């Protein structure tokens, strides 16, 4: 793109290539799992064995809070969150409660689940704040999201690693932009036939060029998310708050006033949420957060997704004692700022959830395209060095990881569903992933012919995807009619997606291995006669 | 509603993009397609390509702009990645299914 001296271009090509080669396979894992994790909420709903229609918050918020407070036995709460489980139950998280152990000074958190049909509590759990967010129904989703976020490496090292991978992706994107001399001329040139080196170059350059703007955006936002909590917050708390992490969090995201605050009657919560929903374009709220319930400085943030055509969430803040509107919710600090706006912008640009299903679908496409760029870049690098045994082996490894990862993810889903019926999904979901990965690696090393290996992988992936919805239904997953009645069209949608993806792979495989050779053979016989 | 707005903005851009891809000289050379028999229009298709995105920005719907741009990059990549032969096959299938004639931009010697 830019006119550079030959030696500078050479160095940049080396930076571009080696940055990819060293960490490219891990980057591919993060990108592909990221593309899948875009549908994290939908995967959680799909993998849940039971779904009920949710309660409308605008009709039931007061009852939900009162039921939870009665269950816990308090009238004032420091912090309280209400959301919905994927099964349809309302879930109330209460934080900053007095510890039942008189010798322990640290406050505890509680989770109360409320049945949407009866309005009665179905489960109460006491524990540390981080521990009560566990959901059996979210095991598969959490496994995939954790693979994307920290590659299942313990904290904080996993976040450091994915943060570094984000930086590598940025370096590769920017250096790729600089070294590509014919960026606009090659914008419409697809892979030239013949599986030559230039074909690999075309494939990589085309996908990389089209994906470039969002590669930079996703790399930047991903790096921010990895480093903000693992590095940024500890550094800020060390420098500005003498190492007091809780004080830093309180200053950054707000924690309300301290000291003696008078109790006060709370406003009609149902009416307040109805008012907020009307102001946010009549969109039902998915949940809310309260600070200082039962006290005169109590505040509620009612969550709303972005309006049609909007990018940022439209969440709104109200005073609980008076019902007065206090303004839009601020994600960072107590006042609107450029930093808060920048951080707020990161979420829609990274997660792609601002436009509902449509934008999520596009973000899956972006993740898929960038995974493709990574794999084709690695293939290009290895194919250029085919005369060396090490790079030939690396080429095989690229194939093993390229196909092995999606197969292992499908394997993890099988492990989850089978364990729902037979064992513990928490244990068997990761084990299924590891076992299937091991089998893929063993097959990849054992089968010498690359075309046969590719056929085995494609067949396994196709069959795995095709049968997955059947297994889900067999182990007691919600049926299509039941799911549609509960307002969860995503369950049949994902089933159909897996059916079609599996079918697509199997048809592709059949055409290449059974039909194409037959046609070629016919052609060979016919040719001399012509 | 989002889907409707995305379709309204992306379809004109993709039509323009389709023309630019089909008439791209380097692409035609690489696949031994005959050179265009007429002058290649640049400004009108480019205007049609970017105008919907500009309109979303002018309307202050930044979410729609990001959605338009991201859809354009993903679908644009897929459109460009398909070879002229692949497009010919898709056109033939569409013709067979719908009975409509899908003409490609003609080349000339």
Image (cartoon, grey):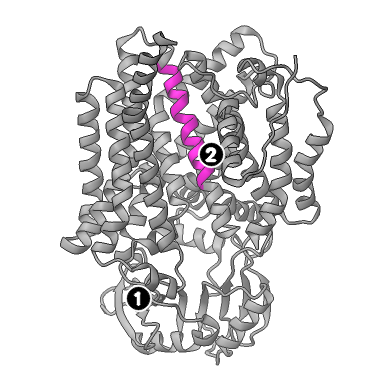
Label 1 marks a residue whose chain is A
| Residue A219: image tag | 2
Q: Is residue A16 magenta?
A: no
Q: Do the residues under discs 1 and 2 have CB atoms within 8 angstroms? A: no
Which residue: 55% across, 62% down?
A253
On the picture, is A33 further left or further right than A177? Answer: left
| Discs 1 and 2 lie in a common subunit | yes
Q: Quadrant of the C terminus of chain B?
A: top right
* Magenta part, dominant SS: helix
Crowding at dot 1, Cα within 10 Å, few <14 / some 14-19 / many 20+, comes out as many
Residue tagged 1: A110
* Residue that lies at the very extreme toward the front in this rendered image: A529
Q: Quadrant of the N terminus of chain B?
A: bottom right
Q: Is residue A374 magenta?
A: yes
| Residue A528: image tag | none
Q: In the rendered view, would you say B6 is above or below A325? A: above
Query: Circle 1 sits in a helix, a strand or a loop, which is it?
Result: strand
- Residue A35 location, x and y as percent? 46, 45
Q: In the rendered view, would you say A301 is above or below B36? A: below
On the picture, is A29 further left or further right than A266? Answer: left
Q: Would you identify the image quadrant in which residue A505 lies?
A: top left
Which residue: 20% across, 59% down?
A419
């Amino acid at each position: 793109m830019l006119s550079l001296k030959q030696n500078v271009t050479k160095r940049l090509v080396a930076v571009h290539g080696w940055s990819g080669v060293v960490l490219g396979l891990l980057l591919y894992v993060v990108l592909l799992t990221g593309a899948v994790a875009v549908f994290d909420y939908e995967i959680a709903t799909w993998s849940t064995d039971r779904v009920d229609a949710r309660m409308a918050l605008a009709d039931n918020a007061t009852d939900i809070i009162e039921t939870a407070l009665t269950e816990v036995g308090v009238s004032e709460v420091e912090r309280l969150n209400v959301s919905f489980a994927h099964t349809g139950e309302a879930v109330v998280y209460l934080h900053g409660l007095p510890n039942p152990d008189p010798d322990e000074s640290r406050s505890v958190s509680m989770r109360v689940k409320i049945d949407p049909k009866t309005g009665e509590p179905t489960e109460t759990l006491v524990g540390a704040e981080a521990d009560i967010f566990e959901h059996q129904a979210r095991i598969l989703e959490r496994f995939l999201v954790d693979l994307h976020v920290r590659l299942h490496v313990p904290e904080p090292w996993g976040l450091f690693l994915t943060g570094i991978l984000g930086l590598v992706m940025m370096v590769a994107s920017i250096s790729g932009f600089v070294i590509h001399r014919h960026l606009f001329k090659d914008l419409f040139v697809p892979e030239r036939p013949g599986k030559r080196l230039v074909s690999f170059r075309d494939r990589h350059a085309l996908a990389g060029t089209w994906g470039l703007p969002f590669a930079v955006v996703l790399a930047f936002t991903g790096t921010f998310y990895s480093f903000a909590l693992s590095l940024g917050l500890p550094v800020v708390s060390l420098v500005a708050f003498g190492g007091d992490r809780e004080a830093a969090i309180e200053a950054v995201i707000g924690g309300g006033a301290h000291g003696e605050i008078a109790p006060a009657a709370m406003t009609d919560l149902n009416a307040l949420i109805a008012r907020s929903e009307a102001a946010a374009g009549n969109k039902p709220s998915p949940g809310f957060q309260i600070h200082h319930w039962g006290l005169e400085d109590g505040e509620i943030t009612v969550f709303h997704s972005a309006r049609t055509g909007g990018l940022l969430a439209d969440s709104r803040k109200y005073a609980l004692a008076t019902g007065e509107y206090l303004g839009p919710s601020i994600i960072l600090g107590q006042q609107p700022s450029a930093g808060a706006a920048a951080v707020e912008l990161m979420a829609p640009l990274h997660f792609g959830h601002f436009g509902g299903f449509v934008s999520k679908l596009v973000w899956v496409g972006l993740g898929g395209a960038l995974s493709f760029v990574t794999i084709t870049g690695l293939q290009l690098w290895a194919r250029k060095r085919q005369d060396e045994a090490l790079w030939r082996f690396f080429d095989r490894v690229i194939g093993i990881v390229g196909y092995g990862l999606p197969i292992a993810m499908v394997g993890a889903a099988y492990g989850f569903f089978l364990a729902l019926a037979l064992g513990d999904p928490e244990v068997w979901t990761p084990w299924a992933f590891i076992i299937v990965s091991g089998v893929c690696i063993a097959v990849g090393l054992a089968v010498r012919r690359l075309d046969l290996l590719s056929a085995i992988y494609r067949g396994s992936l196709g069959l795995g995807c095709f049968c997955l919805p059947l297994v889900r239904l067999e182990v007691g997953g919600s049926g299509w009619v039941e799911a549609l009645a509960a307002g969860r069209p995503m369950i049949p949608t994902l089933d159909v997606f897996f059916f079609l993806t599996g079918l697509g792979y199997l048809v592709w495989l059949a055409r290449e291995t059974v039909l194409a050779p037959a046609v070629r053979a016919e052609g060979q016989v016919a040719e001399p006669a012509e | 509603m989002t889907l409707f707005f995305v379709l309204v903005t992306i379809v004109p851009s993709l039509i323009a993009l389709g023309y630019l891809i089909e008439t791209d000289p380097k692409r035609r050379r690489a696949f031994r397609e005959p050179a265009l028999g007429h002058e290649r229009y640049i400004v009108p298709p480019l205007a049609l390509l970017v105008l919907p995105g500009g309109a979303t920005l002018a309307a202050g719907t930044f979410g729609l702009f990001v959605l338009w741009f991201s859809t354009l990059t993903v679908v644009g990549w897929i459109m460009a990645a398909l070879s002229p032969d692949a497009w010919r096959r898709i056109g033939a299938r569409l013709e067979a299914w719908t009975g409509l004639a899908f003409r490609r931009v003609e080349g000339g010697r």
